[in-house]
C-alpha cells in the first residue's frame, strides 16, 4: 500500500519507531501512572514536607499503623484520632529512650575524667577521690527521673 506522498506501509512503521525512540531518548521511559498509597494523604495524617523530628517520626510510623488499624476504624476521623494519640505516645517514649541512651553514654565516657567510664578502664589506677566520681555518677540517673 502506498500513501499519496509515495511512502509505503513499511517506511511509515519505521518512521514511527524512530520517532518513538527519539521521544524515549529525550523524555525517558514513560511509566504508567500509579496513585499514591491511601495512607499518603493529609486526611490520614501524612505530612507532605516534614521539617521537625516528630513529623518525620510520624510519617515513618504511618504506613505500618495504617495497615494494622485502618480496617478496624469507623472512618478516617476515627483513624486520625487514634493515629495521633498512639504516635504522640510512641514519640514521647522514643525521646525518653534517647535521653537514657545519652545519659548512659555520658556516664560511660572514658575520655572524660569526671565520668565513671574512666574507672572501668583496665589500665586505670584507682584513687581515693574516685569515690566522689562514682557516687555522683550513680546518683545522676535518680536525679534525672525526679525532674
Image (spheres, rainbow, N blue to C red):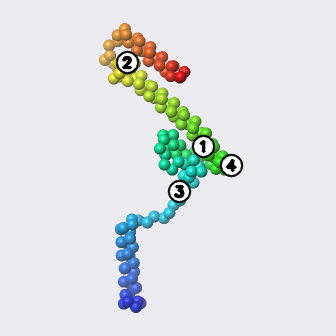
Is residue 74 in view from this perspective?
Answer: yes
Image mark for residue 114: 2
Q: Are marks 2 and 1 in contact (CB under 8 Å)?
A: no
Q: Quadrant of the N terminus?
A: bottom left
* Badge 4 vs badge 3, beta-carbon distance below 8 Å: no
Q: Is residue 118 left or right of residue 138?
A: left
Instruction: Residue at 52% x, 45% y: name it.
Output: 59
Above or below for 7 versus 67? below
Ranked by sequence position, the earlier of labels 3 and 1 is: 3
**Helix, strand or loop under label 2:** loop
* Crowding at mark 3 (Cα within 10 Å: few <14, some 14-19, many 20+): few
- Counting residues from the start of the chain, the first of labels 4 and 3 encountered is 3
- Tell me the SS state at disc 4: loop
How many residues crowd around disc 4 within 10 Å: few (fewer than 14), some, or many (20 or more)? few
Viewer-proximal residue, 55 or 39?
55
Secondary structure category for the residue under label 1: helix
> What is the number of the mark on residue 113?
none
Circles 1 and 4: CB atoms closer than 8 Å: no
Q: Which residue is mark 3?
A: 36
Would residue 131 appear left or right of 56 to someone viewing this image? left
Spatial CA distance of label 1 from label 4 is 13 Å
| Image location (x, y in percent) of residue 50 | 49, 46
Question: Looking at the image, is 130 positioned above or below residue 60?
Answer: above
Amino acid at each position: 500500500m502506498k500513501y499519496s506522498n509515495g511512502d509505503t506501509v513499511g517506511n511509515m512503521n519505521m518512521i514511527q519507531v524512530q520517532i518513538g525512540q527519539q521521544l524515549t531518548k529525550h523524555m525517558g521511559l514513560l511509566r504508567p501512572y500509579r496513585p499514591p498509597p491511601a495512607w499518603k494523604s493529609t486526611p490520614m495524617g501524612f505530612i507532605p514536607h516534614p521539617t521537625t523530628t516528630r513529623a518525620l517520626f510520624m510519617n515513618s510510623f504511618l504506613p505500618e499503623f495504617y495497615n494494622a488499624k485502618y480496617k478496624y476504624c469507623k472512618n478516617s476521623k476515627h483513624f486520625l484520632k487514634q493515629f495521633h494519640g498512639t504516635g504522640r505516645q510512641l514519640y514521647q517514649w522514643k525521646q525518653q529512650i534517647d535521653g537514657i541512651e545519652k545519659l548512659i553514654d555520658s556516664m560511660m565516657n572514658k575520655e572524660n575524667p569526671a565520668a565513671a567510664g574512666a574507672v572501668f578502664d583496665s589500665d586505670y589506677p584507682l584513687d581515693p577521690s574516685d569515690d566522689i566520681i562514682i557516687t555522683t555518677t550513680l546518683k545522676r540517673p535518680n536525679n534525672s527521673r525526679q525532674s
